[in-house]
Image: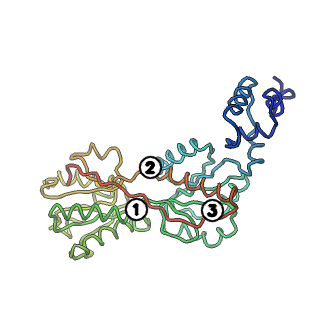
Amino acid sequence: MTEKNKTTIYDVAKMAGVSKQTVSRVLNNRQDVSSETRTRVKKIMDELSYHPSAIAQSLSRQKSYLFGVVTAGLRFIGPSRTLSGITSKAEELGYGLLLKELASFSSNNVKPLLQWFKSHQVDGIIWAAPEIEDNRYWLKDLMPDLDIPVLFLTMEENNQVTIVTTDNLGGARVATEHLIRQGRKHIGHIAGPLEWWEARQRKLGWETALKEAGMQVSEQMWTLGNWSPKSGRSAFLELLAKYPEMDAVFVGNDQMALSVLLSSQEIGKRIPQDLSVVGFDGIPDSEFYCPPLTTLYQNQDELGRVAVAELASQIEHKINDNIIVEPKYITIQPELIIRQSS
């Protein structure tokens, strides 16, 4: 059929013996249509190969069915797993995605980015890049003038916006409490880079668990890495030198924990007899470390799915009920997976 003679909603209505409004209700999944009529209209749409215009539907529904997604570091496991969850849930709910990857984790020149999303009429934005240093400073200046919902992942609670995050502090406490229950008396920590909010939260969780157990915390008991296995090796050797009595270590992520396992074997420390090791992230490879790594599994796929569901809900409330949903702080609990390293 040529573009000029393309099937319209009027053709469907005429052949089905119903009004155009009834066809529209079927397209919008309205409940005020009988099952018999709905079945007949859908059958006619199939016979005529009728495909409603996405642009027309977005105008009638006051929605574009598009989300903007801002991410960073897609070459890393965590951001890619989160994006997978965002994509699958958006597909399930009928939303398309417009994706922008920041040049670096700490990028904070976001005004042109926000304007680009607004010009493409997205219904809302998911900010999936993590909070690092001052890369959220723009919130207080730009958010008040942004008339679309923006939902953030992995950042400190902020009463201006809705946030969905893993409970990093709570997870670190669980990891440290596990080591305490194993009878370990000298539990060190290798932190990720402390300009990352997640790294600070995990370090704080370690400190909190030790203090609640009546143990002292000092500077000699922890050191810094940068998330990479190479940095984990140097941080571990530095920590051992200043805290030689250490009999357990909570490591800020699984990749740094990998180098702790390897380095321990090289210097003759037995795991877990001489040193218990717990990581954080639950990356798939951790099960196959030598020995298999005890870790806090953070479900980043679920993180992305929850973010999409929450943002879609806020948009529906804004359009149908004409209300703005109050900001929420939603935390997803990580799961302790106990393996041979502890």
Q: Amino acid at mark 2?
A: Phe
Q: Residue 240 at x, y = what percent?
A: 20, 65
Residue at 53%, 48% in the rendered image: 86
The residue that mark 1 highlights is 167
Q: For the residues marked 1 and 3, what is the alpha-carbon distance in whole angstroms? A: 26 Å
Q: Residue 329 at x, y = what percent?
A: 50, 65
Q: Quadrant of residue 12 in the image?
A: top right
Above or below, 161 against 25 in this view is: below
The colouring scheme, among rainbow, by chain, secondary structure or one colour, is rainbow
- Asked which secondary structure carries label 2, the reply is loop
Q: Nearer the viewer, residue 109 or 14?
A: 14
- Asked which secondary structure carries label 1, the reply is loop
**Farthest residue in the right direction?**
4
Q: Nearer the viewer, residue 288 or 181?
A: 181
The residue that mark 3 highlights is 110
Crowding at mark 1 (Cα within 10 Å: few <14, some 14-19, many 20+): some
Q: In the drawing, does residue 307 fall left or right of residue 94?
A: left
Q: Quadrant of residue 236 in the image?
A: bottom left
Q: In the drawing, does residue 332 fall left or right of residue 171?
A: right
- Asked which secondary structure carries label 3, the reply is loop
**The label number, if any, that marks residue 76 in the structure image:** 2
Q: Amino acid at mark 1?
A: Asp
Residue at 44%, 49% in the rendered image: 76
